[in-house]
Image (spheres, rainbow, N blue to C red):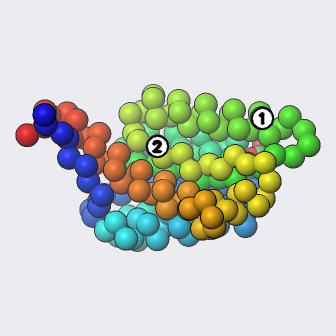
Amino acid sequence: MKSYPSVTEAPGKRFAIVVARFNHLVTARLLEGCAAEFERRGVAADDVHVAWVPGAFEIPNACRALAETGRYAAVVTLGAVIRGGTPHFDYVCRAVTDGVREVARDTGVPVAFGVLTTDDIDQAMERVGGSDGHKGEEAAAVAVEMATLLPALAAPPS
Ligand code: INI
C-alpha cells in the first residue's frame, strides 16, 4: 500500500481568510486562533491575507472572489451563526454552507469551513478555545493539509 504524503506545515504557501464581523466577539477569536495556527505551521504572516465581510451570508461571495484569483493555496472561512428566535438562522446557515461548498467544488481551491452554527453564545465560546477546542485553529490546520494534499494527488504516490 502507498499513501499520499500527509503534510502538516506549509512554508512558502499563501492563504486567504474570510471572516464575518457579525458576532465579532466570537469571530475575532476564531481569527486569532487561525492566524496563530498558520504561524505554528510555518506560514509567514505576510502570506496570510484577511478579508472581513459583514456577516456569514456574505462569506461565499468573498471566498469565491479570492479563490478565483489563483493567488491562494487555500481559503479559510470563519463566522459565527447563532440561533435566534426566528428562521433567519436556518437561512443564513444554509446560504453559507451551500455557498462555501459550491466555491470549493467550482474552483477546485481547498476551502476550510470554520463557520460555527450554534444554539447560543456559550456553545460558540466553547469552540473558540473553551471546552470544545478551537475551530479557528482547526480550520487553519485543514487548510494547510488540503493545500498540500490536493496538488500532490496529480501524481501517483511514490
Ligand atoms: N450573520 C452572522 O454571521 N451570524 C448570525 O448569527 C446572523 N444572524 O443571526 O442574523 C447573521 N446575520 C447577518 C447576515 O449574515 C447578513 O450579513 C445580512 O443578512 C445582510 O446580508
The amino acid type found where label 2 is placed reads: Val
Residue at the (30%, 58%) spot, across then down: 8
Q: Residue 43's x, y, as percent?
A: 34, 66
Q: How many marks?
A: 2
Image position of 147 (left or right of 112): left
State the residue in front, 65 or 146: 146
Residue at the image position 53 percent from the left and 33 percent from the top: 101
Q: Nearer the viewer, residue 38 or 129?
A: 129
Give residue 24's mark.
none
Residue 55 visible in image:
yes
The local secondary structure at tag 1 comes to helix
Q: Of the residues tagged 1 and 2, which is closer to the observer? A: 1
Query: Identity of the amino acid at label 1?
Result: Asp
* Observer able to see residue 21: no
Give the spatial CA distance, label 1 vs label 2.
21 Å
Q: Quadrant of the C terminus?
A: top left
Mark 2 nearby-residue class (10 Å; few <14, some 14–19, many ≥20): many
* SS category of the residue bearing label 2: strand
Q: Residue 13 placed where, x, y %? A: 30, 58
Q: Residue at x 62, y 36 (%)?
A: 97
Quarter where residue 134 is shown: bottom right
Residue 15, relative to residue 117: is it above or below? below
Percent across and percent down for residue 114 are 56, 50
Q: Which residue is mark 1?
A: 90
Split into 4 quadrants, where in the image is the N terminus?
Answer: top left
**In this rendering, would 51 be left or right of 126?**
left
Give the mark nearest the N terminus, 1 or 2: 1
Residue furthest to the right in view is 85
Quadrant of residue 127 in the image? bottom right
Q: Which residue is mark 2?
A: 111
